[in-house]
Image (cartoon, rainbow, N blue to C red):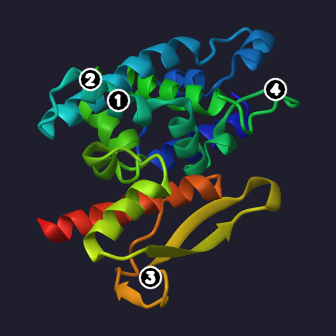
C-alpha cells in the first residue's frame, strides 16, 4: 500500500473513531470501480449493496423504537432519509471526497459516488464488526444523520406554506418569516446554514414571538434545502411548546 493510500485510510478511521480489524474492507469501501478496474482490486460495489440493506434495517428499527409501525409511514420517512440526495449531503458534511480512492481524473463532486461510498462504508463496518448493527449506527448513522429525530417525527416539509398556515392559525394574523444565512466554502461548492428565524406580523413587521438563537438548519449544499430544514425545525419548536 502506498504511503498516500495508507495515510488516507488512517485519517478516515480517525474521522469515524474506528480501527478496522480487516483494513482491506475499508480500502474496498473507498475504492471506485474505475480505479478498481485499473489496479485489479475490488471496488465498493458489493459493500454498497450490503450497506444499503444495513442502513434500511437501522432506520426501520429506529422508527420501530419511536412507535412508528405503519408500513406506509415507515416507507415514506425511510425514503426521505435514505435517498441519494440525503446520503450525498451527509457525505459532503463529513468531507468524504477527501478519502475516496479514485483515478487521477475521475470526478466525484456532485455524483452519486458519494452516496454509494457512504453505503459501502456502512457495509464494511457491518462485516468488520461481525454484523454489529449498533456499532454501524454509533459510528456512521448517529453522528452524521443530523436531526434524525426531527425527520422521524415529521419529514422535511415540502414548502414554506405549511409553516405559514400553522402560524397564521396560531396568531390569527398574516405572517412574514425572515431568516439569515451563513455561507461556507468556495463559491462553486458552497455550504448553506439558515439561522436566526423571526416570526413577524406581516403588516406591522412586529416580532410576534422570540425563537431561540440556537435554532438553525443543518449544513446543506443549497439555500432552498437549508430553508426547508429550518422551517421544519420552527414548526417542531411551536408544536413542542403546545405539548
Q: CA distance from mark 3 to mark 4?
A: 52 Å
Tell me the CA gap for discs 1 and 3.
33 Å
Can you tell which of label 1 and label 4 is closer to the viewer?
1
Distance in Å between CA atoms under marks 4 and 2: 42 Å
- Sequence-wise first label, 1 or 4: 1
Within-10-Å neighbours for mark 2: few <14, some 14–19, many 20+: few
Question: For residue 76, which numbered disc appears in the image?
Answer: 1
State the residue at coordinates (45%, 46%).
16
Of discs 4 and 2, which sits in the foreground?
A: 2
In the image, what residue occupies the spot 50% across and 49% down? 15
Which residue extends farthest right? Answer: 105
Q: Give the mark count.
A: 4
| Rendered view: 78 above or below 224 | above
* Mark 4 touches mark 2? (CB < 8 Å): no
Q: Position of residue 155 (x, y in %)?
A: 36, 44
- Image-based side of 154 in relation to 205, left or right: left
Which x, y percent locates residue 25?
50, 22
Q: CA distance from mark 1 to mark 2?
A: 6 Å
Which mark is first along the chain, 4 or 3? 4
The residue mark sitting in front, 1 or 3, is: 3
x 65%, y 53%: residue: 222
Where is residue 64 shown, x and y percent of the image?
16, 32
Label located before the other in sequence (3 or 2): 2
Say which residue label 3 marks.
Answer: 200
Which secondary structure, mark 2? helix
Residues marked 1 and 2 touching at CB (< 8 Å):
yes
Q: Which residue is mark 4?
A: 103
Between the C-alphas of marks 1 and 4, the distance is 37 Å
As helix, strand or loop, the secondary structure at mark 4 comes to loop
* Residue ID for mark 2: 72
Amino acid at each position: 500500500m502506498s504511503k498516500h493510500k495508507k495515510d488516507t485510510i488512517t485519517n478516515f478511521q480517525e474521522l469515524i473513531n474506528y480501527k478496522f480489524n480487516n483494513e482491506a474492507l475499508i480500502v474496498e469501501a473507498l475504492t471506485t470501480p474505475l480505479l478498481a478496474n485499473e489496479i485489479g482490486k475490488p471496488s465498493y460495489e458489493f459493500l454498497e449493496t450490503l450497506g444499503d440493506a444495513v442502513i434500511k434495517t437501522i432506520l426501520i428499527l429506529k422508527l420501530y423504537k419511536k412507535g412508528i409501525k405503519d408500513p406506509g409511514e415507515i416507507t415514506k420517512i425511510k425514503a426521505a432519509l435514505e435517498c441519494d440526495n440525503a446520503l450525498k449531503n451527509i457525505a459532503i458534511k463529513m468531507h468524504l471526497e477527501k478519502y475516496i480512492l479514485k483515478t487521477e481524473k475521475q470526478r466525484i463532486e456532485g455524483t452519486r459516488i458519494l452516496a454509494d461510498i457512504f453505503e459501502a462504508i456502512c457495509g464494511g463496518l457491518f462485516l468488520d464488526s461481525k454484523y454489529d448493527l449498533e456499532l454501524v449506527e454509533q459510528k456512521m448513522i448517529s453522528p452524521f444523520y443530523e436531526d434524525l429525530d426531527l425527520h422521524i417525527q415529521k419529514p422535511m416539509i415540502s414548502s414554506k406554506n405549511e409553516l405559514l398556515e400553522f402560524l397564521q392559525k396560531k396568531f390569527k394574523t398574516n405572517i412574514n418569516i425572515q431568516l439569515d444565512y451563513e455561507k461556507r466554502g468556495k463559491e462553486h461548492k458552497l455550504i448553506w446554514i439558515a439561522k436566526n428565524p423571526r416570526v413577524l406580523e406581516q403588516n406591522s413587521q412586529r416580532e410576534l414571538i422570540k425563537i431561540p438563537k440556537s435554532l438553525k438548519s443543518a449544513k446543506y449544499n443549497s439555500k432552498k434545502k437549508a430553508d426547508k430544514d429550518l422551517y421544519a425545525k420552527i414548526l417542531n419548536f411551536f408544536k413542542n411548546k403546545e405539548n
